[in-house]
Image (cartoon, grey):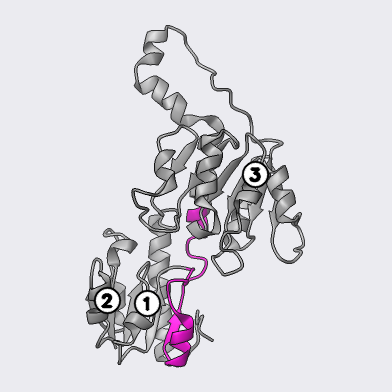
Amino acid sequence: MKITVLDSDALGRDISLEPLKSVGELTVYNYSTPDEVKQRIADCEAVIINKIKLDETNLCFAKELKLICVAATGYDNVDIGYCKKHNIAVCNVVGYSTNSVALLTVSMALSLVTHLKEYNRFVVSGDYTKSGIPNRLEPAFHELDGMTWGIVGLGNIGKKVAKIASALGCNVIANKRTAEEGYNIVSLDELMERADIISVHTPLTESTRGLISAEKIAKMKKNAILINVARGAVCDEKALAEAIKNNAIGGIGVDVYSTEPFGEDHPFNEIKDLDNVLLTPHNAWGAYEARERCLNDIVENIKSFLSGGMRSRVDI
């Protein structure tokens, strides 16, 4: 099987792709422009992507393509309808990044709650030394114990975050479509109104696009923190930026964006330097161990496909 990796840089250059050679003839590209994608998938039988978009505009050139492996859980960058129509199998990878995303989610919350950026800057700027005072307690920070942590989307990652938040003493509430034993499920409106920390973990679908709207953001407490590690388009990014500029909410931590990387005209450019804003480059999923698991799962998906199995198929 001819296997082409279109954007290996998205998996990190420190990860060896050698395991893929056990399941086919491997060609690797660090990154591919839209025009290059059309050329590079023309004669391959399996393609591996992370963020590259595959739809009718380029898949029509892939006459030999049998399998698309997405090196991620979300697969909204692949036209599943086209793949079904043209008998192209599509596999994703589930569960590999749970610990990694939960780690960054909680790290963002802890940093924002404790004002680590401000305190660190006070020390490294030399102001601490000049002050002659052995400590500084402004801005005031508060213990997590007793706070309410609201979780939007209660999949593997949401449940992991819920477990950690509970261990830190938070009262956890969650929003999902159906009730689930062991969790306090509430409406999204109630969650936005009650939570001191809100973390978003829902996949991007037509029903979740714009889910965290300006109207929902307006319901948040003045000191509440919102963290988005799901998909950028789940939140109204302009409304988030406006809420920060107007001091309507306490802070945001964001790892995902509607356009990646976001451009110079993105609303977050106006707030990116503020102390209560933490922006990371869509790396929450990418702990080294998580990326190794992702690669190993892709190999298993290809093996399954070659033997007629249906492992991790999202097109059926």
Residue identifier under label 1: 54
Can you name the residue that lies furthest to the top here?
A: 132
Q: Assign the N terminus to one quadrant of the image.
A: bottom left
Residue in view at x 26 percent, y 80 percent: 38
Element type where label 3 sits in the image: loop
Disc on the earlier residue, 1 or 3: 1
Residue identifier under label 2: 37
Specify whether residue 195 is in view.
Answer: yes
Q: Quadrant of residue 234?
A: bottom right
Q: Quadrant of residue 279?
A: top left
Foreground mark, 2 or 3, reads: 3
* Kind of residue at disc 3: Ala
Element type where label 2 sits in the image: helix
Residue identifier under label 3: 218
State yes or no: discs 1 and 2 in contact (Cβ < 8 Å): yes
The part of the chain drawn in magenta is 73-101
